[in-house]
Image (cartoon, rainbow, N blue to C red):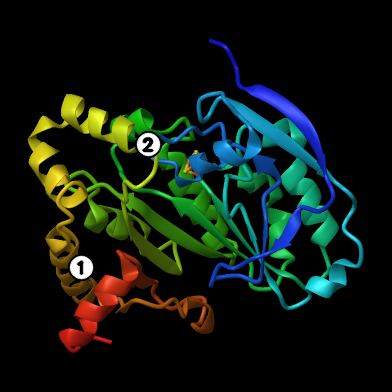
Amino acid sequence: MKGPIIREIDTSNVIVKSNLPVCDYSANPYTGCTHGCMYCYASFMKRFTGHTEPWGEFLDVKHWNPIKHPERYSGKEIFIGSVTDPYNPEEECFERTRTLLEELRGSGARISIATKSDLVLRDIEMIKEFPEARVSWSINTLDESFRSDMDKAVSIERRLESMRIFHESGIRTTCFISPIFPGITDAKAIILRTKDISNLIWLENLNLRGSFRTSVMRYIREKRPELVPLYEDIYSHGSKSYWIDLDSELRAFAAELGLDYVTNDDSMKRPFDAPPIIVNYFYHEMIKKNARRDGHA
Ligand code: SF4
């Protein structure tokens, strides 16, 4: 099988100011992502980088000028992998994410890392040195066959195992249940598998606004035809009732488990050993409005 098209490119700076509410800066050591998820929201970046190859089949490896005065990031949160996975398989040889961590080491920066890989285990000792570091893994199914239909990243079991190792090492972990595929993602089962090895469980709905809508709908028609009416209801007719019902169901489930269920993340303020907090980020503004109407926090 043909591998991805890899280019090494020069860039002046890998860390940029971020507009995201969860961080001050973001850093993406790669453009493109060879995990090639069918539903990847980052695939839009093809348009801005001049790539014509299919998503998942190219990777630009960034080389930047060494970070000057890394201490200026002291106390700031840097989100590594805000757009694409910093631990794609090619990181094993190019080590750009590792280089970034080495350059930031001792700066006092707080880092969060998002991945679908267990290659991050390679850097665990260095990550441990950062204040308030946290690592998140995306897990939207426990079914390996659905997983392999969706992405080329490592198995769910390998993600869970790396989450366990990080958590047992005292590093905060997040289970990012995203994107939730209506009728397919069993969020309750994932919560049960991760509640003892995570500090934060984040829920996010599948949205089909991107160019991947056609591929996802084709997949549903071919593999899960019984779900076509539900997907059309949500994604063609704009119905939100599936998410509102799931929100209520998961809120009740969290209560049964004794877990907090909120629409804002305050997990960093909690003791490390506290049970994870569940954050609902479904169409977040709409759900918050409904929650306020229903008297929830
Ligand atoms: S791992 Fe993330 S960035 Fe990479 S293809 Fe999948 S969704 Fe996109």
Q: In which quarter of the image is residue 150?
A: top left
Answer with left or right where residue 156 lies relative to residue 146: right
Residue 227, can we see it?
A: no
Answer with left or right where residue 157 lies relative to residue 165: left
> Could you tell me which secondary element the residue under label 1 belongs to?
helix
Image location (x, y in percent) of residue 289? 25, 80
> Could you tell me which secondary element the residue under label 2 belongs to?
loop
Answer with left or right where residue 214 lies relative to residue 107: left
Identify the residue at image location x=78%, y=72%: 73
The correct choice, above or below, for 52 with respect to 264 in the image is above
Asked if the residue at label 2 sits under 8 Å from ligand 1, the reply is no
In front: 186, or 159? Answer: 186
Q: Residue 212 carries which label?
A: 2
Q: Distance between the residues labelled 1 and 2?
A: 25 Å
The correct choice, above or below, for 120 with respect to 245 in the image is above
Identify the residue at image location x=53%, y=29%: 56
Across the whole image, how many numbered discs are drawn on residues? Answer: 2
Identify the residue at image location x=47%, y=40%: 158
Q: Residue 247 carries which label?
A: 1
Image location (x, y in percent) of residue 28? 67, 50
In front: 65, or 163? Answer: 65
Image location (x, y in percent) of residue 231? 16, 44
From the image, state whether disc 1 or disc 2 is nearer to you. 2
Marked residue nearer the N-terminal end (1 or 2): 2
